[in-house]
Every structure is written in structure tokens, then in C-alpha cells.
Image (tube, rainbow, N blue to C red):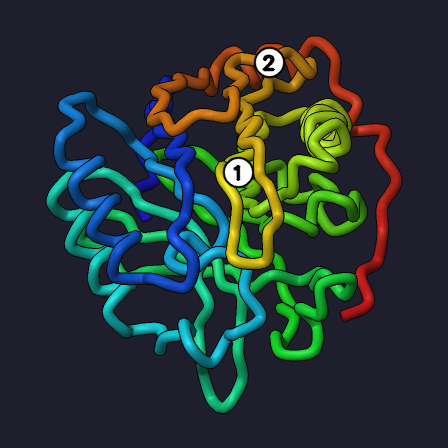
Amino acid sequence: MNESLKELLVLGIVQFDIEWENPQANRDYLTGLLKSDERKFDVLILPEVFTSGFTNNIEKVAEPMHGITVKWMIQMADTLQCVLCGSIFVEENGHFYNRFVWVAPNESPCFYDKRHLFSAERENEKIKHGKALTLIKYKGWKILPQICYDLRFPVWSRNVQQYDLMINVANWPGARRKVWKTLLKARAIENQCYVTGLNRIGSDGAGIEYTGDSMVIDARGIELYSANHLKSVEQVTIDYNALQKFRKKFNTLNDADRFSLLI
């Protein structure tokens, strides 16, 4: 990864209505949407399982790690000259994963497998949970990827790695939108970092409604951006030096509890 610091990191928040169990249609839609946008981004963020929606028909939509969607992500990252990231269902060694894939231009993809699986919707019956945190270093920033339900578990995201930005990609139902907003702010405040929560909109094949509410929050819990329920690609800039200045002035991380994670 590129280690030289880019003080101002420009995020692209891509909130859209995922077409149910139709990877090709979703890739085609995103290709047109992103190629037509003339703005410059450092990181374009897509929702959880952006090719299919949150379906239990995993066998129908899962792909190999180096299948058509990851190849598409590589091509798009090179074309747009920015990172493209989001989660997809991946099949690997006889198991299925809900995998956050990060693709930077001219670099090999890296990934994080969702740790906390949503048993209320039987995700745990087909998906294998991840066993390790992933810390991504990009343009001098340390970035922690997480997926949807992970947001509810603060020990898993405890900032002992001194990461600067948490990215949570989600299919978070509108019925629990207040919880979504509350937890995003809590994770930002307790970990003294920027938090980006990227959610989908619309309704899925199971009849679940999603209200978007994608957000970018600073370490004070202040909303830098808050979306509504509409399709959008929003450009949001976050400031590395401002974050470090705040941490130096009011550093609660030095006093935080230390946890031993049992995998």
C-alpha cells in the first residue's frame, strides 16, 4: 500500500437500491454511475453485498475471490484511479464468506471477512465467520473495514491499532435506523476516529425496507454528512491532521481498557 500521507482523503459514498440477486445488473448500473461522475475520489465505498442484496440464496450469487466481480472492481479502480470497496458473497475452499473487498489501483486486492453473523436472519447457517481483524494502510491512513452487524460489538472494533477511519458497509433495515445512527456515532466517539457507515436503500426480495441513512462522522461524534433515503454519490473529505490534533488535545485512547480477543 502507498504509505505517503494524503492529509485530505476524499470519500465517495455510493448509496443505491441493489437489484435482488442480480450481480450483472448491479455491476452494469455502477459502471454507468461511476464512470459518468467527473469528480475525483480517493476511496469509493459500496454497500454490503452490493451485487446481490442480503439473500439466503448464497449458492446462487456467491463467486470465487478472483471471479467476475473482483475482476470488475480491479478494472474500475484502475479506470477511475481510486480505491473501490464493498462486500460480496465469496465461495472459497468449500465455504461461503461475506467478504469486504478493498481494491486500490494497480495493487492486489485485500479483504476482511465478516466476523459477526446475523443469526436472526440465519446468516450464520451458511456463512463462515471471519477470524481476524484487517487493518488497511492507504495513503498514510490506517483504515478498519467492518460489515453491518459488526457495528453492534464494540470490543471487536476497539481502537488498539490506532486506526484513523472505520468503514462499515451495510444492509441495515429501516426499522432499526435509529440504532444504526446511534451506534455509528458511538463507535466514532469511543475510538476517536472517523466513521463512515454506508447503507443501501430500497426494498429487497424478502420485503425488507432500507432507508439509507449513510453517514460520515468525526471523532467528536459530529456528522460531516448524513444521507436521506435517495440514490446518491456524495463526496466527503476527511482531514488527517485535524484528527491527530484532536487526539493530542483530548486523548481518551490512552486510558482505554485492553481486551484479549478469543477467536
Residue 114: image x %, image y %?
A: 60, 61
| Residue drawn at (34%, 20%) of the image | 235
Horizontally, residue 111 falls left or right of residue 118, namely: left
Q: Residue furthest bottom?
A: 94
192 vs 69, nearest the viewer = 69
Label 1 neighbour load within 10 Å: few <14, some 14-19, many 20+: many
Horizontally, residue 79 falls left or right of residue 218, namely: left
Q: Which mark is residue 215?
A: none
Q: Quadrant of residue 220?
A: top right
Above or below, 54 relative to 168:
below
Above or below, 147 relative to 251:
below
Quarter placement of the C terminus: bottom right
146 vs 261, nearest the viewer = 146
| Residue drawn at (17%, 27%) of the image | 37
Horizontally, residue 221 falls left or right of residue 225, namely: right
Residue 52 visible? The answer is yes
Q: Which mark is residue 223?
A: 2
Q: Quadrant of residue 51?
A: bottom left
Residue 164 visible? The answer is no
Q: Say which element carries label 2.
A: strand
Residue 207: image x %, image y %?
A: 59, 51
| Residue drawn at (50%, 51%) of the image | 48
42 vs 226, nearest the viewer = 226
Residue that numbered label 1 is attached to: 199
Q: Say which element carries label 1.
A: strand
Using the numbered discs, state the Cα–Cα distance from disc 2 to disc 1 in whole angstroms.
15 Å
Q: Amino acid at mark 1?
A: Asn
Q: Amino acid at mark 2?
A: Glu
